[in-house]
Image (cartoon, rainbow, N blue to C red):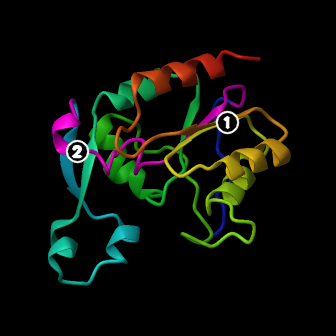
Amino acid sequence: MGYPSLMTTAPDRPLLLLDVDGPLNPYAARLPHLRGYRTHRLHPSAWLSRQTPGSRPHRRGLRVYLNPAHGPRLRSLPYELAWATTWMDEANEMIGPAIGLPADLPFIAWPELFATDPDGLYWKTRPLLKWAAGRPFAWVDDMITDLDETYVRDHHDARALMVRIHPRRGLREADFQRLTHWAAGP
């Protein structure tokens, strides 16, 4: 898989690169603590490929918790939204409609899912930088490490913000405020 060219309508706005599992789907949450979230059963192909065909999980689908308030909040941020998730274009089909995001957001088509990086970086980091193509960005993900932050700082000439989201909590008000504040910076 290659990288689709970055189609942009607002090159002066930074990118907001969104992961699904962790930030939008707090998969590690304890159910009673998920106020505002709705449960969905979805069948993303990357997940299905790791299930036994015909098994109960394969038939029922992946349980995903999504907050419909996140879509309007994300759309109100001063960013150009794009998916940076293993869901790739399926995020447009399955996640976007459930939270009120457009069905045509750009996405990163990863060359290889879960690839081992020779320097111990998160497998998304190098392809994400290549896809951003020198644009300023904020990246929201639950798997970003200090090593990734250092790599981005050393190999990306534009501004970049990495926002680590705990997979038990998902995106919260403080995260939206941090994203808003960063986008307003120089």
Q: Work out which quarter of the rendered image holds the C terminus and state it.
A: top right
Q: Where is residue 37 shown, x and y percent of the image?
A: 23, 36
Name, please, the residue furthest toward the bottom: 53
Give the extent of the magenta segment. Answer: 11-35
Disc assigned to residue 137: 1
The structure residue drawn at horizontal position 18% and vertical position 81%, both measured from the top left corner, is 55
Q: Work out which quarter of the rendered image holds the N terminus and state it.
A: bottom right
Left or right of 109? Residue 142 is left
Disc assigned to residue 28: none
Q: Is residue 30 magenta?
A: yes
The amino acid type, in three-letter code, at marker 2 is Arg
Q: Earlier in the sequence, mark 1 or mark 2?
A: 2
Q: Give the total of numbered labels.
A: 2
In the structure shown, which secondary structural element does the residue marked by tag 1 occupy?
Answer: strand
Disc assigned to residue 30: 2
Most foreground residue, 108 or 67? 67
The structure residue drawn at horizontal position 39% and vertical position 36%, both measured from the top left corner, is 101
